[in-house]
Image (tube, grey):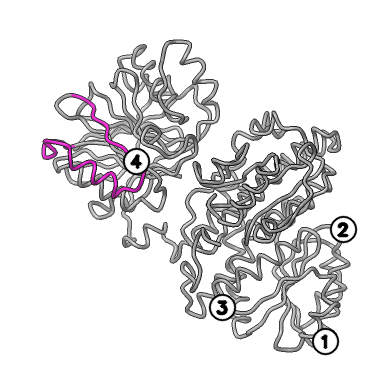
Amino acid sequence: MCGIIAYIGKKEAIPILIEGLKNLEYRGYDSAGMAFLNNGKIEVVKCAGKVCDLEKKIKEIKDQKRIFSGIAHTRWATHGIPNDTNAHPHFDNEIKVALVHNGIIENFSKLKEELTQKGYKFVSDTDTEVLCHLIAEGKRRYSDTKKALSYAFSFVEGSYAVCVLFKDEPDKIWGIRNSSPLLLGIGRDEMFLASDIPAFLRFTKEVVYLEDNEIVCIKKDDWKIYDKDSLESKNKKSHIIKWNYEEATKGGFPHFMLKEIFEQPQVIENCIKGRIAKGKEVVFEELLDFSVPQRLYIVACGTSYYAGLWSKYLFESWAKIPTEVEIASEFRYRNIPFNPDKDLVIAISQSGETADTLAAVRISKENNMKVIGVCNVVGSSIAREVDRVIYTYAGPEISVASTKAMSSQMIALFLMAIFWARKRGFLPKEEEERLVFSLLELPNFLAKHINKIRDRVKELALEYNRFKNFLYLGRSIGYPLALEGALKLKEISYIHAEGYAAGEMKHGPIALIDEEFPTIAVVLNDDLVLKIISNIKEVLSRGGDVLIFGVQNEKLEKSEISKEKRVKMLILPEFTYPLSSFLILPALQLFAYEVATSLGRDVDKPRNLAKSVTVE
């Protein structure tokens, strides 16, 4: 996820573009840049770092008062480490085309190879640069810019929101989108294109929402939208935004945490892109030259540790790979008898900078172990030091309490488990196709139900926010979900909560159960439903209240506990196991969120916590 803004009008463009980038910096902050026409030439200024670093560099530009249009970008890297060269905008070899891009070009390797054979030279490591050369090729073939853009993007697979500046069209800026946001802002004698409303909210509240496969052309006093394929013009209605700036920055949500929970359908879709072939088979270019390990060590901290623990059940069940999930701060001080020929380490970290996980990576490398990183931040320390990195494409996560990052990690690990299971011959083709089909359905299914989930959770939170202690129970893959639910409640509401394997409850925690100590039980649609129902009965017999976060299944619905007065339920729609976890997870996160907000907590910045733990 990156932030883009374009401006054309009667005002000085550079201050407006800088302000727009600052308002979009929550979407990306590892590099920034802008392009504009100056004395008849395209000029590009960009650098690694934050928008403030670009602002210092831009002060060197002369004649700024004569620049009335431009495009700008603040980056969250997905291809190529954050540096000056990989920063946007990018341009063609003759510097006649400059563009900024938000999204992922899935077939960029193939396009890059074909364009190189045609004589185009590449200077960056990004997927975006192929778009510059494709558009340049289109302009060579067609004098009509609409046709040139249509031609260029007919070869592109993936998601994109793009703003383009042409040297020979100083009075226009072009845009095109597919599966990434791009908005048109209509001002008085000025027009804007941006990836989100905060970029231009101070200047105008009149907005046109662009849809997939639409091309837009803006002038200072006019705008037109065309269908990418037919090139026919389209009539679009504008809308008046009623948000204030803070609401717009958060997409209309009161907190970043809530916004990020609701982004999970899109995050899941982003992590899947490019990793499913023909809608049936998992592909993992990052793992092709790796032998399937005979033993896995997964090292992580906090929420990332729970994502790894969840995947342990999949690696062992599907791929038959014995898997040890280790807390990184413990792993780094153990004297583990590694077997580099057979073992593999997976290090999970959203930021890629977690101190203990990074230390575990280095210890593993010192012992000649191969290490795969599962990270969200391109160019982070872990991403640079591992043998191979699998990016989760979750985009910036602003709230300290991690939500969407865990979903993306679980999806990446889910895909790895299927990939290795097939390579080992343990997962029948039909089963893989069934799981892949359900995975492709998951983003839309979750998006359809997440508002209903929140409505019910909000009711439950108001009933349970008076309690000072909670016990969370789960079995199998429900156990790490219970651990994560308890952690989220602790983090943001400051209420004590313990996550436990349900079968362990009788080995101690059951002594705590009374009418002031409720239990939250995670009940999935698996073969252990009757086992956890038995655990729930044990809680009820000790006078404790029970709140069930469950997936619809006949055994639960027909059990006698469903009629108990001290049992409340949130029953989620049936979905393919184990992907039903992705319904339970946001429900648990929302419960913590609603309890915390009802108590007046600062959910985005809970006390004593930092987003990334970079010291031991």
Q: Which mark is residue 527?
A: 2
Q: Classify 120 as above or below 211.
A: above
Question: In front: 154, or 241?
Answer: 154
How far is disc 2 from disc 3 in space, using C-alphas? 34 Å
Of the two numbered discs 3 and 1 on the same chain, state the one appearing first in sequence: 3
Q: Which mark is residue 542?
A: 1
Mark 2 touches mark 4? (CB < 8 Å): no
Identify the residue position indicated by label 3 in the image: 494
Mark 1 touches mark 4? (CB < 8 Å): no
Q: Whole-percent x and y of residue 290? A: 71, 32
How far is disc 3 from disc 1 in space, using C-alphas? 26 Å
Q: Residues within 10 Å of mark 1 (few under 14, many from 20)?
A: some
Amino acid type of the residue that numbered disc 3 sits on in the rendered structure: Tyr
Identify the residue position indicated by label 4 in the image: 73
Q: Residue at x 58, y 72 (%)?
A: 458
Q: Residue at x 78, y 39 (%)?
A: 293
Q: Nearer the viewer, mark 2 or mark 4?
A: 4
Amino acid type of the residue that numbered disc 4 sits on in the rendered structure: His
Q: Whole-percent x and y of residue 24? A: 35, 50
